[in-house]
Image: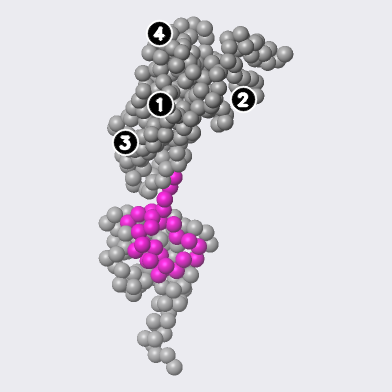
Amino acid sequence: MLGVGSLGGVFLLWGPGGVLSPGPHSQNVTVVIERGSTLSTMAHVLMAEGAIKHPWGFVVGVLFSGNRGNLKAGEYLIPPYARPLDIVRIFVSGKVLVHQVTIPEGLTVAQVVDIVKGLPHLSGEVIHIPPEGTLLPETYQYIRGDSREKVLSHMRRAMKQTIEETWASRKEGSPLKTPEELLVLASIVEKETGVPQERPRVAAVFLNRLKKGMKLQSDPTVVYGLTLGEKPLGRLLTFKDLESVSDYNTYLIPALPPKPIACPGRKALQAVVSPANTNDYYFVADGTGGHAFSPTYGAHLQRVKEWRKIQKGG
């Protein structure tokens, strides 16, 4: 027969809420353990979130495993039916819950900063606004409590590294002189087309124009000159807009703008250093979401006429 002590031990291990008894939750449970939390506080957090049946089961599990000084603060995902002892091991591991945010290609820095400001698990304010175009569109991971400045710095380092690697792979004969010019042109290519396979051809058009000293005549640069990337224009461009005096108006300046107009992705950057082999100098929307390209102004005018006919529903 088991003695009273043995029975008590069995109960502590296997009884309802015991150290080795499955938890009551049938789904993942997220718990946040703040720095400086006592063992009692941790147990009550777990209880409140429905991860354990009784606080004492977790407390005994910690003491039983000898890990009282090894529990780490953070945000944790507790799997279904996890036993108190399993939860102790999770807290000891320090494998906190990882969140992620995806930054779409072609946003301005102001738009990216707004996204980061809105992430609920981050801490602190955004004090330093990065220069335009210097944040790489990508999916980033972060943990609860990371600072917003840290996340933005990660994005900026990723762009710096990507530009360096892309610039090193450029072909000879490019009219671009610096990695900064690569970033500027890639931002224009990114804003000009939403069709991924078009990027190398759009890049080729602009590079061909730069080689000949032609104005780029890019509408997105005019938009940026009007808004500075702080908000959408909210309307179609007018002929008056194309005459607006701005360092970004490539209908007026015979060169690249002084700075990027958005944050280009890897593929836009790669398109600029590996453009399509064409003699195109013009492109216009073709009504399918893409563009029609032309090597001569005469051919371009015909394409424009076709586009206007589509716009009118003809």
Q: Which residue is mark 2?
A: 289
Nearer-N-terminus badge (3/2): 3
- Discs 3, 2 touching: Cβ within 8 Å: no
As shown in the figure, which amino acid type bears the numbered disc 3?
A: Glu
Give the residue at x 40% y 26%.
182
Nearer-N-terminus badge (4/1): 1
- Give the residues in magenta: 73-100
- Discs 4, 2 touching: Cβ within 8 Å: no
Q: Which residue is mark 4?
A: 245
Give the residue at x 44% y 93%.
1
User: In the depicted view, which residue is nearer to us: 180 or 157?
Assistant: 180
As shown in the figure, which amino acid type bears the numbered disc 2?
A: Gly
- Helix, strand, or loop for circle 2? loop
Nearer-N-terminus badge (4/2): 4
Q: Is residue 94 magenta?
A: yes
Comparing labels 1 and 2, the label whose residue is closer to the camera: 1
- Helix, strand, or loop for circle 3? loop
Q: Quadrant of residue 94?
A: bottom left
